[in-house]
Image (spheres, rainbow, N blue to C red):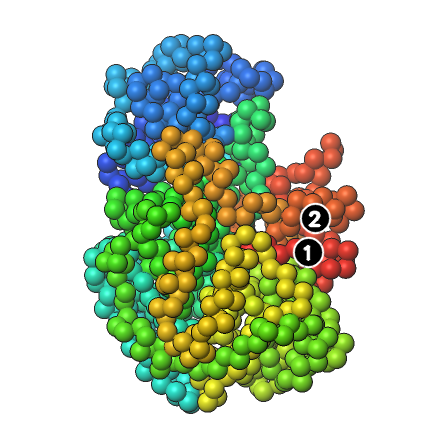
Amino acid sequence: MQPLAHTENTIGQLHYLSDHLQSVGELACRFLAEGNAELAEFGRWAGLLHDLGKYRAEFQEYLRGQRAPSDSTHHAVYGAALAFKRKCVPIAFAIAGHHRGLQDADDLRTMIGKPAYDALTQCESLAVKFNAEIRNIPHSLPNHEIFTSPQNRLRAEVATRMIFSALVDADFLDTEAHYFAESRPVPPKFDAADLLQKLDVERRRKSAAAQNAKCDINEIRNSVFEQCVKAGKSPQGFYSLTVPTGGGKTLSAMAFALSHSAYHNLRRIIVVIPYLSIIEQNAAEYRGILDPDDTGIVIENHSAVSIASENEEATSNSEARSRNPLVLAAENWDAPIVITTSVQFLESLLANRPSRCRKLHNIARSIVIFDEIHSMPQNLLRPLLSVFRELQHNYRVSFLFSTATQPAFRRQFNLPNGFEADEITEIVADPPKIFRRLSRVKYEINLDQPVDFPRLANEISAHGQVLVVVNTRRHAFELFEAVRQRANDDNYHLSSAMCAEHRFDCLKTIRESIAAGKACRVISTQLVEAGVDLDFPIVYRALGPLDSIVQAAGRCNREGRLKCGIVKVFRPQDNTVPPGIYRIATERTAAILANLSDDTLAKDPYIFQEYFTQLYGNVDAGADIESDRARFNFQTVAANAKVIREEGIAVIVPYSGTTKDAMTVVNELRNRGDARLFSRNDLRRLQRFIVNLRPTEFAYFRDQRLVTPLYGFNRNGEPIGPSIWLLDKAVYNKRFGVLLEQRPAEEFII
């Protein structure tokens, strides 16, 4: 009887093990060859051996319903043990972790050494009997000097992650093709030259429409765009785009990326953005220009849908895990242009879970645009810069750091792998000159007299159009309520307690009100301050980090229609700010502003290099994480390298927008009937209506029966299909989003 890899699919077809191993090996080999040909053979053998343990009689009996799941039905360890025996440790790591995640080195050795797994020889002989490819297994699996030299340990760590990523993605794709009874989808073609031409058409249209600006914004934006196109034909490496807010960075950065991709034959562009509000805006803009028919050229990946335990041993049911629709639907970034958040990108570089690491191999041979690069977490700088360098040197990845407040990342005592002066190439000529020409605001800084919210609300209510940015969710809510008591109409509150589609619609209404000259008062946290295309005559910013203040100022007189906009920096009477580096940066900013002229803040981009250098010199930049990386402690690194400590739980909210409706998508999925057919495309459609909640918030809603599974419950009261939950409409407010005991839920930027 032919050994099986998976049970029958929806049309009754069985998935034979020999076919699965062959297919996964070929796919993983191809994935790695596209980024680093030296690793291709590692991918092929990882694929051929990853399910070696499924040849055992115990596992086959389990698949055919003749045995209950137990320790005897675990399978990943056998291929890992064989790879370890043949002295190919990276393949051992990848195979052992393809369900449970990459482990620490000592844990891997302990697992492989368990007496229960002594059946390796029997397992190997069964594999040889049924799979001709494995008959040719060499005495020593492929190896490379990067895995044997002590000087290359960090390089070997990244290579092991790449092998793991390629194996997981290949395994998921082949399993998905079986259960969906269809061939694997082919991503859209990436024609960078054609897309660059479309982008240039849009640039010219915008330029013609902005002729009424009262300063030379058009000339500067066109010049920056043209310099970016020209720079795209430079060698691969690290680049910076230091342009003030309103200087056209969004289109110009993409112009550089498309020009660079066409010149170097790169596979994709990955745009990394810190805030949800920007990702929605930029994704919509890029899609409207480059993919108006929504063919999949541009995808968003921001909502981190929580995937239940991926640990094979925790469930004792690897078959159930392998066909879990939510696991199979995990994002793999197979599109030409990916718009994602810094949390998604940065944690993927240092994660250990299969669903997070699945997309890593697709970063190879790409260009990564870091929008608002100043927001990189300081406690992860050492490991992240190390991985960036490795990706650039050995996986054909270029990086563009784009922001109005360029950080230094200079080499210093606690950042020994920081950049030297000549390692990052600035694209635009003479950034200070551009900053001086685009200076469109005047700062009014008053930190000596703290202001209470009732008095501030009176002042805000007197303005027709005004933006106020504060540091905490509580401050935003309290100030909004104070303003609403004085001016009941035309007030807006922006928050990530609102789903992406809701925020998108709200921002659209705000822009229309501004353009029509209507009253419009917006109270927000820092969510709105960086990159969001808003143009107010006056902006208030609570004392915070220096870069945050200047980014908020970028929402003032953005198009230069006024002679000068006003930015008021104030100190709230209750000067509560988030702890950690945010608080340290706020305190340092107060000291800087006390001795800084307003003109310097508006016109000198280099002030931020010194500011960030001082700031980085007082933080732990991740030295312990680097040490664990060198010891191949993947699980420990993942635990310590989280951008957000408490991971959110995703819920679908019942929002009905101007063009899209959550329940329409939900009902389509439910009417399709079979929960096993939930796909990556379904997850991409739903993420526009997803909000991430704290575990305590989710538990509260579940206790109150205010969340239900997407596909309902089975007879045992367990969720059917993917573990995605739908929030009751009673707790989703049209102004604030998710309400928890009549207050907006805590804010997550994921």
Q: Position of residue 689 (x, y in %)?
A: 60, 57
| Residue 176 versus residue 55 in the image, above or below | below
Question: Residue placed at 71% from the left, 44% from the top?
Answer: 699
The label on residue 393 is none
Question: Residue placed at 60% from the left, 41% from the top?
Answer: 722
Question: Residue placed at 61% from the left, 70% from the top?
Answer: 571
Q: Secondary structure at mark 1?
A: loop
| Residue 635 versus residue 227 in the image, above or below | above
Count up the numbered dots. 2
Q: Position of residue 115 (x, y in %)?
A: 47, 9
Task: Tell me whether circle 1 and circle 2 mark residues in contact (CB < 8 Å).
Answer: yes
In this view of the protein, can residue 261 be seen by the observer? no
Q: Secondary structure at mark 2?
A: helix
Q: Is 713 positioned to the left or the right of 187 in the image?
A: right
Q: Position of residue 678 (x, y in %)?
A: 56, 44
10 Å crowding of disc 1: few (<14), some (14-19), many (20+): many
Name which residue type carries label 1: Ala
| Residue 624 versus residue 447 in the image, above or below | above
Q: Is 318 positioned to the left or the right of 174 in the image?
A: right
In this view of the protein, can residue 537 be seen by the observer? yes
Q: Which quadrant holds residue 143?
A: top left
Q: Can you identify the residue that label 2 sits on?
A: 697
Name which residue type carries label 2: Glu
Q: Position of residue 698 (x, y in %)?
A: 69, 46
The mark nearer the N terminus, 1 or 2, is 2
